[in-house]
Image (cartoon, helix red, strand yellow):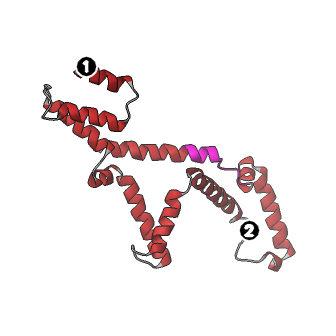
């Protein structure tokens, strides 16, 4: 009878819920099966993995908790609000809920903009308006820009092609995976 019950459960596609129910029946004290402490421990590990306690859920996601806290501090300072302000929660969830590729695109664009600015900073004094420059100063700026753009790496930076979406995506995912693997080891 027991084998028939086991075969019927295993013969169909077992979902997590039915698997847990099956294991629970094996480790219950009422069923006459030789259950070892290891069986019970295995069940508890499986159950905690699928239905972790709030404390375990928090501990298993410490990197996310740290980033969430850091972002909370940044937004609280930017908007001069406290943790209970709906604006803070709305801003945090706007970031959390956005598709991953949007963040990659924004970071790629930001990195390319910074590279372009680094290229232009020594060539063009941003403190001066272009119309206030003398003809000699303008000619010198154009000459320096032309020399700088002849280098392919500077040309790519100026055109916003220093960093590709694929490079940034790969780098972010690699870094995130390292944090997640490191967290599991602790």
Q: Looking at the image, which residue is at 72% across and 72% down?
A: 125
Q: Is residue 164 magenta?
A: yes
Q: Quadrant of residue 5?
A: top left
Comparing 126 with 96, the one in front is 96
Q: Looking at the image, which residue is at 49% across and 77% down?
A: 79
Q: Quadrant of the N terminus?
A: top left
Image depth: mark 2 or mark 1 in front = 1
Circle count: 2
From what the image shows, is residue 48 above or below residue 10? below
Q: Is 52 placed left or right of 109 in the picture?
A: left
Label placed on residue 3: 1
Q: What is the magenta range?
A: 160-170
Q: Is 114 placed left or right of 179 in the picture?
A: right
Label 2 sits on residue = 124
Q: Quadrant of the C terminus?
A: top left
Locate residue 40, reporting x and y percent: 18, 35
From what the image shows, is residue 69 above or below residue 54? below
From what the image shows, is residue 125 above or below residue 22? below
């Amino acid at each position: 009878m027991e084998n028939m019950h086991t075969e019927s459960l295993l013969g169909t596609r077992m979902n997590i819920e039915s698997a847990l129910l099956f294991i629970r029946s094996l480790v219950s004290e009422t069923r006459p099966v030789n259950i070892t402490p290891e069986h019970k421990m295995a069940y508890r590990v499986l159950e905690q993995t699928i239905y972790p306690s709030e404390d375990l859920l928090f501990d298993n996601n410490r990197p996310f908790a740290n980033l969430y806290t850091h972002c909370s501090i940044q937004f609280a300072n930017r908007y001069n609000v406290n943790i209970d302000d709906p604006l803070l929660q709305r801003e945090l969830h706007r970031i959390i809920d956005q598709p991953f590729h949007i963040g990659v695109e924004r970071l790629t664009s930001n990195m390319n903009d910074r590279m372009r600015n680094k290229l232009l900073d020594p060539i063009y004094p941003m403190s001066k308006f272009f119309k206030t420059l003398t003809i000699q100063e303008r000619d010198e700026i154009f000459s320096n820009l032309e020399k700088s753009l002849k280098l392919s790496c500077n040309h790519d930076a100026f055109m916003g092609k220093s960093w590709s979406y694929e490079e940034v995506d790969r780098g972010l995912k690699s870094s995130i995976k390292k944090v997640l693997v490191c967290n599991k080891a602790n």
